[in-house]
Amino acid sequence: MKKPVIGITCIQANIKGKMVNTLNDFYFQAVVRAGGVPLIIPSVTDEDTIAEFAKNLDGVIFTGGHDIWPLRFGEEPIKQVVEITHERDDMEMKLFQKAYESGLPILGICRGIQLVNIALGGTLYQDIYSQVLNVGGHSFDYDPTGVYHSIEIVDGTIMKEIYKEEMIQVNSLHHQAIKNLGKDLRITSKAHDGIIESIESTNDRFVLAVQYHPEAIAEKHPVHQEIFNYFIEKCKKH
């Protein structure tokens, strides 16, 4: 059987004066382990090029990275928003719409869950530490391969089908989170402080997105590899 080709978006960053597109190894390692072929998608903004990417993919992973420009969900940025990349925002919004419209399976991770939510009309907390009362810790970046806090999973969801547990431990590397949920989405897990940790589509499209980084903890904690295994199986059927 032909292996599914999975487009993985990447970080656009200025490193030593050079603009680069870069991706953490964890992402493509998780895809390869699951039986997919990773294809890194750079931050191009040409619509025809993005359309060609979508035509040749069997699924898309929207990855972590810089904050999404708040004006994309109708808010002026607060002072805690200091890193944005307009080209990446533009490319990912266009790629999401093409993938969503064509029914490509979509997996969002960290920034990716936020991108999915905004693309479907939702909003974000620009900084949970200043905007959410009694928020817990969500920015443990000392060891991304280790777990940090717990999340509670909702019954009857894809997350429950994958993890088969009511509560699991995850890592956490973010300061933004979903505020108002986008169209045709539902919440499938939350942290103890109420922060939304995963969502899925309520229509016939396959959309799964998580706020944590399963790719980084999948090797030490193999249960988190199951998200990628499940996603790749959906991509094979597309």
Image (spheres, rainbow, N blue to C red):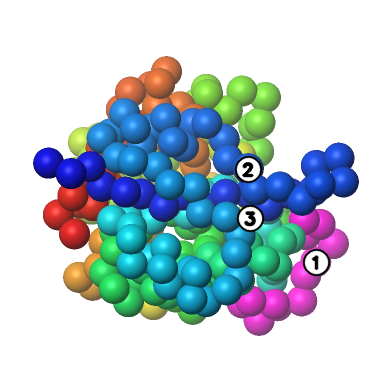
Check the image and report above or below for 165 versus 19: above
Give the residue drawn at x 81%, y 47%: 18
Q: Position of residue 169 (x, y in %)?
A: 42, 30
Residue 143 in picture, x, y percent from top left: 61, 23
Where does the image place residue 218, in percent across and percent down from the top left? 40, 27
Question: Is residue 204 found left or right of 57 in the rendered image?
Answer: left
Crowd class of label 2 (few under 14; some 14 to 19; many from 20; radius 10 Å): some
Q: Quick one: label 1 or label 2, which is nearer the N terminus?
A: 2
**Residue 79 relative to residue 54: left or right:** right
**Disc 1 vs disc 3: Cβ atoms closer than 8 Å?**
no
Count every numbered label the image shows and give the total.
Answer: 3
- Seen in the picture, residue 2 relative to 78 is either above or below; the reply is above
Which residue was labeled with disc 2? 22
Q: Which segment did they paint magenta?
A: 71-83
Establish if 184 lies above or below 23: below
The residue drawn where x is 78% and y is 70% is 77
Q: Secondary structure at mark 2?
A: strand
Q: Quadrant of the N terminus?
A: top left
Q: Is residue 7 magenta?
A: no
Quadrant of image for the C terminus: bottom left
Give the number of the disc on residue 176: 3
Q: Is residue 106 visible?
A: yes
Q: Which residue is label 1 attached to?
A: 78
Distance between the Cα atoms at labels 2 and 3? 21 Å
Residue 177: percent from left, percent from top: 57, 57
Q: Amino acid at mark 1?
A: Ile
Q: Of marks 1 and 3, which one's residue comes earlier in the chain?
A: 1
Label 1, secondary structure: give it. loop
